[in-house]
Amino acid sequence: MSASLVFAIVAGLLIILGSPIAVCLGMGAYIGLILIGQDARLAPVMIYDALDSYILISIPFFIFAGNLMARGGMARRIFDFSNATFGWMRGGLGAVNVVGSMIFGGMSGSATADAAGLGIIEIQEMVRHGYPLKYSAGITLATSCMASIIPPSIIMVVYGIYAGESVAKMLVAGILPGLLVGACFLLTNYLVAIKHNWQPSMHFSWREALKTSRDAILALITPLIIMGGILLGTVTPTEASCVAVWYSMLVTIFVYKELKPGELFGVIRETARTSAVIMLIVATASLSSQLLTSDNVPQAVGTFISTVTVNKYVGLGLVVLFLLIVGLFMEGIAAIIVLTPIFLPIAKAWQVDPIHFGVIMVTCMAIAVMTPPVGVCIYAICSISHLSMEDVARSLVPFALGLILSLILIIAVPGISLLLIDLFW
């Protein structure tokens, strides 16, 4: 029995038993390594090497910045600004939900931070204005996934590392696809609003728009500071994450004064807890990836797919279908680390640009954060809305269709992912 088969059996059984994904991957890979005769002491060394990366430092800092923004008043100001500028549309607060999440996603890089931070405000305001609770929860869950695509996306950082591609280019490549997903969500919300005859949340007022933009300006320029520094070459993605933390801390504590210095320890503790979970997943998924690679799984998968089809779009469709199925059972970052070494060589053989393929993979994993049974965001939204997972999942259907439409366009039109790369590099 091959080590990869042992890994799949052990990891699969642990997933069925409800073990955390890091435990499933780590135990499966560890037993597989022992089976092929490796020294058991090699696993800790491989795990340490997986985490010994300068660029990985950006992940806890982006999480820290997102937590500061959510707790320090930035989320509320972004919502008020979005309402003043987009609330005039049919189904206005749904549109505000989409735009607010796009802006906040461009600050935090975390779908979970968006769902747990801005999501509370979005659901409360939509319900207060007469929107059904189930619809409010569904659209909030859908829009939270945009943080996985729009820079500074944490999962984009992980793909860049494990694909051997520029993290800065990966982050820039997510801008237009993220805007496309947002546009599809706006269209979906508009069509649902027409069906139910939902009216705008408010009439457009230049005075109100200017007032809210003035209050939110320090929050709104955060994405410009992060991506502007990266595009100009002034800072690396890791340095940009540190700048985001210092900027968020100064604004929330000394300007908005909504985050007290004494509350900072609680934010740090929350950041440490979230970062530890992600880093443990990164470490064990990397161990699993090395096991699969040493067992020649990438070559076997490539040979199998090449016998099924020689058409790259049919092949990409099969890969995407597989990724969507994997996303039901595996956390997105873990799936990226394990599957990138398997599918990236195949994509290169089809002459698909690695950065374009990365955007495709990340978009698939963006769907994973909101689908049961392991989607972290659906649990956050269920906790906030006090709805069952079934109710939230059903309300998600129209937006899942919009996200799949976006994914098809991203696959069919590589320029959506690569246009800005060609302009800046």
Image (cartoon, rainbow, N blue to C red):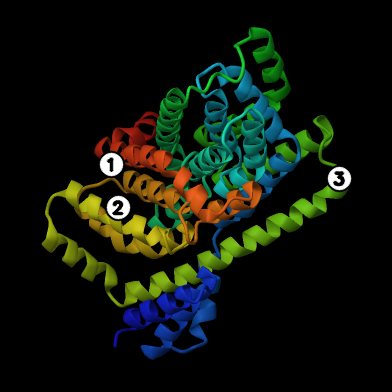
Vertical placement of residue 80 versus 346, above or below: above
As helix, strand or loop, the secondary structure at mark 3 comes to: helix
Q: Position of residue 300 (x, y in %)?
A: 22, 70
Of mark 3 and mark 2, the one earlier in the sequence is: 3
Quickly name the residue at label 2: 320
Of residues 18 and 397, the one drawn nearer to the viewer in this rendering: 397
Quickly name the residue at label 3: 261
> As drawn, which residue projects farthest toward the top?
206
The N terminus - image quarter? bottom left
As helix, strand or loop, the secondary structure at mark 2 comes to: helix
Vertical placement of residue 159 versus 235, above or below: below
Q: 10 Å neighbourhood of mark 3: few (<14), some, or many (≥20)? A: few
As helix, strand or loop, the secondary structure at mark 1 comes to: helix
Please give the name of the residue rendered at 81% of the width and 54% of the height, measured from the top-left corner: 265
Image quarter of residue 97: top right
Quickly name the residue at label 1: 411
Decide: marks 2, 1 in contact (CB < 8 A)?
yes
Q: What residue type is labelled 2?
A: Val
Marks 3 and 2 sit apart, C-alpha to C-alpha, by: 46 Å
Marks 3 and 1 sit apart, C-alpha to C-alpha, by: 46 Å
Taking 304 as reference, is 31 left or right?
right
